[in-house]
């Protein structure tokens, strides 16, 4: 920072503010997206939004017929985790576009 004039500092602040505004907009866009995960060869399909809230859950009736509650619970967890993993990867990818791959602590 040594030798940077007031204009340089103001420019740096402006860039930081623009980056923050872009990130906020991207976060809003990501929150509105939907991500689907499956388990057991689509026996269970879970859909989450960009805020990691489960918004839809589809269970194949054939899975319920088996009466294996533990297996069904495992499939639901696996499907939700799969959907959340996709959401997280997408979020990281979109944020990296803004930050240029810089890891900025506390941003996500």
Image (cartoon, helix red, strand yellow):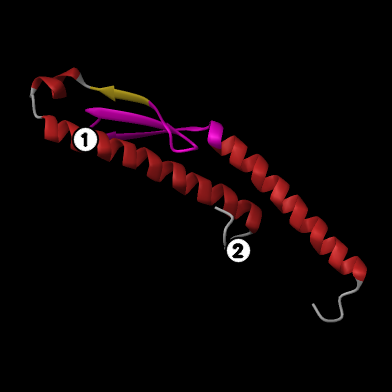
Tell me the quarter of the picture where residue 6 sits: bottom right
Q: Is residue 61 left or right of residue 48?
A: left
Q: Is residue 59 left or right of residue 55?
A: left
Q: Is residue 38 left or right of residue 22?
A: left
Tell me the quarter of the picture where residue 67 sits: top left
Q: Is residue 105 left or right of residue 57?
A: right
| Numbered disc 2: secondary structure | loop
Asked if one can make out residue 39 in the rendered structure from this viewpoint, the answer is no
Residue 81 image point, x, y percent: 33, 42
| Numbered disc 1: secondary structure | helix
Asked if one can make out residue 76 in the rendered structure from this viewpoint, the answer is yes
Q: Residue reaching furthest bottom?
A: 2
Q: Confirm whether the magenta stretch covers residue 54.
A: yes
Residue 102: assigned label: 2
Residue 75: assigned label: 1
Tell me the quarter of the picture where residue 13 sits: bottom right
Stretch of the chain drawn in magenta: 31-55
Residue at the spot x=91%, y=73% of the render? Answer: 5
Residue 50 image point, x, y percent: 49, 37
Cα separation, mark 1 vs mark 2, equals 36 Å
Residue at the spot x=9%, y=29% of the render? Answer: 68
Mark 1 crowdedness (10 Å alpha carbons): few <14, some 14-19, many ≥20: many
Residue at the spot x=72%, y=46% of the render? Answer: 21
Q: Confirm whether the magenta stretch covers residue 24.
A: no
Dot 1 or dot 2: first in sequence order is: 1
């Amino acid at each position: 920072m040594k030798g940077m004039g007031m204009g340089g500092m103001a420019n740096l602040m402006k860039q930081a503010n623009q980056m923050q505004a872009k990130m906020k907009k991207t976060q809003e866009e990501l929150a509105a997206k939907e991500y689907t995960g499956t388990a057991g060869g689509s026996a269970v399909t879970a859909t989450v939004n960009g805020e990691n809230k489960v918004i839809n859950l589809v269970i194949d009736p054939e899975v319920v017929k088996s009466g294996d509650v533990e297996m069904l619970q495992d499939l639901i967890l696996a499907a939700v985790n799969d959907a959340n993993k996709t959401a997280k990867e997408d979020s990281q990818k979109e944020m990296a576009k803004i930050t240029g791959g810089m890891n900025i602590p506390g941003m996500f």
